Image: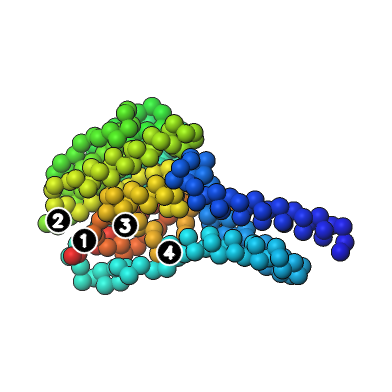
Amino acid sequence: MPRLCRHLLSLLKVGVRLAAVASLLAFGARWHWLMDTLANFRVQYALYLVVATLLLLLWRNFRWSSIAGVAAALNLWIVFPYCMAPPDSASGGKEMSESFRLMNFNVLSSNRCCNEVEAYLREIDADFVFMLETSPDWEPTLKKMRDIYPHQKNEIQSGNFGIALLSKTPFKEVKISEYTATIPSIDAVVLVGEERVRLIGTHPYPPINAKVSGLRNSHMQRLAESIAHNSVATKTIVAGDFNMTPWSPHFRNFLLSAQLEDSAKGRDLQPTWYALPTFFFGIPIDHICYSRGLRVDTRRVGPDLGSDHRAVWVDFWIGD
């Protein structure tokens, strides 16, 4: 075997070893924040390991191709539910009573592409829009949008935790909640036809160390408890930058505790952060989750608009 081929084979084995170890360590995500970080990259591990398996087979290195293949299969098994259409898909949505569109977009507090973002919001024409990281620089844009979104609840903040809800229709109820001190979430009730729908926008801390990872997890758990204990018979949607992917056990705990479904499940794998055109460099951390009585018709991820995130919008149908 030529020297270059031996060198490439050696690098390939190192990559397989690292990806396989990271895949296994990610199962400890419930107990340590670094392992939870590793769990975010299941798709990347799978893509690399599938390619490595094929290359190792071509080199007739069956031992290492078997290791890579098993590790790839493990990651593919975990992400597969997001590629398979769910049984409650709204293929029969035309028979349901009401429809509406909701968008969630972390616009980035330092983003200067305000005109492009405004044009995109007008193009998509959602009924409700959560905008995250609405710093004072975004206030003029919010005001300009009042011609189509006359009903707004804005909590403008310097830094990265401002939040706004734009609505075409009046709020029946609206308030600011704090599931983490000083970090506002918006909690509103709107009427869609005759149905009361609770809309919650939230943005917990990013998990950059053990302390803020714990704050993120407790934030989402308190939010789930608020939803579970809600005595008003409303359908619920939670949208935001959760700073966690579907592969995190903390995300699954949130869905289970709040009795919500992930709108992305069965509707393709699309990254929302970092705003690059291929999944190999991005992860899905911006979410729209929903309760029983709602069905997803369409879910899309928006283009690069100067933020490090991409917008997510979903068309919902209301039905029993």
Q: Which quarter of the picture shows residue 318?
A: bottom left
Q: Residue at x 33, y 48 (%)?
A: 254
Q: Earlier in the sequence, mark 1 or mark 4?
A: 4
Q: Amino acid at mark 3?
A: Glu
Q: Secondary structure at mark 3?
A: strand
Q: Secondary structure at mark 1?
A: loop
**Residues at circles 2 and 1 in contact by the CB criterion of under 8 Å:** yes
Q: Earlier in the sequence, mark 2 or mark 3?
A: 2
Residue 62 appears in the picture as rendered: yes
Residue 302 appears in the picture as rendered: no
Mark drawn on residue 81: 4
Give how far apart the Cα atoms at labels 1 and 4 are: 21 Å
Residue 123 screen position, x and y as percent: 36, 53
Mark drawn on residue 261: 3
Q: Secondary structure at mark 4?
A: helix
Mark drawn on residue 195: 2
Task: Bin the neighbour count of mark 2 within 10 Å (Cα to Cα): few under 14, some 14-19, many 20 and up.
Answer: some
Residue 228 is left or right of residue 255, and the answer is left
Q: Secondary structure at mark 2?
A: strand
